[in-house]
Amino acid sequence: MYNNSNRLYRSSTDKVLAGVCGGLGDYFNIDPTIIRIIYVLLTVFSAAFPGVVAYIIMALIMPQEPPTFNGPQGSY
């Protein structure tokens, strides 16, 4: 139905707080550390409040990445 590789999800494996920057990194095929550095710089230079509110909104709106099945002996 949908190809999960081009959908925006919060990362379930590469996360520090809620997985928003990890999900954005997966979506744009960029290292999530670069996304985190850019986000922190933008947040600090914009008086912090808009950046914090935007992160909270993204954490609430973006769906969690669905689990992947690793085979008959693997786990979810």
Image (cartoon, grey):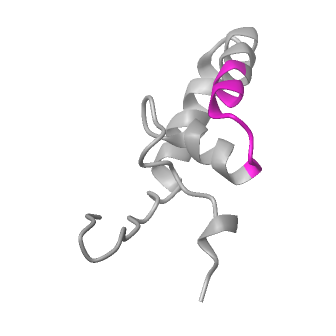
18 and 75: which is toward the camera: 75
- Rendering coords of residue 45 (x, y %): 75, 10
- Quadrant placement of the N terminus: bottom right
- Report how many numbered discs are placed on residues in the image: 0
Q: Is residue 30 found inside the magenta-colored segment of the image?
A: yes
In the rendered structure, the answer to whether residue 40 lies left or right of residue 66 reads right
Q: Residue at point 41% right, 67% down?
A: 68
- Rendering coords of residue 21 (x, y %): 59, 37
In the rendered structure, the answer to whether residue 4 lies left or right of residue 41 reads left
- Quadrant placement of the C terminus: bottom left
- Rendering coords of residue 9 (x, y %): 55, 57
Q: Is the residue 25 above or below the residue 40 in the image?
A: below
Q: Is the residue 16 above or below the residue 72 in the image?
A: above
Q: Quadrant of residue 7?
A: bottom right
Magenta residues: mostly which secondary structure? helix
Can residue 57 be seen in the rendering of this structure? no
First to last magenta residue range: 28-37
13 and 72: which is toward the camera: 72
Q: Is the residue 5 above or below the residue 9 in the image?
A: below
Q: Residue at point 27% right, 77% down?
A: 72
Q: Is residue 70 found inside the magenta-colored segment of the image?
A: no
Q: Residue at point 67% right, 42% down?
A: 25
49 and 65: which is toward the camera: 65
Q: Is the residue 17 above or below the residue 58 in the image?
A: above
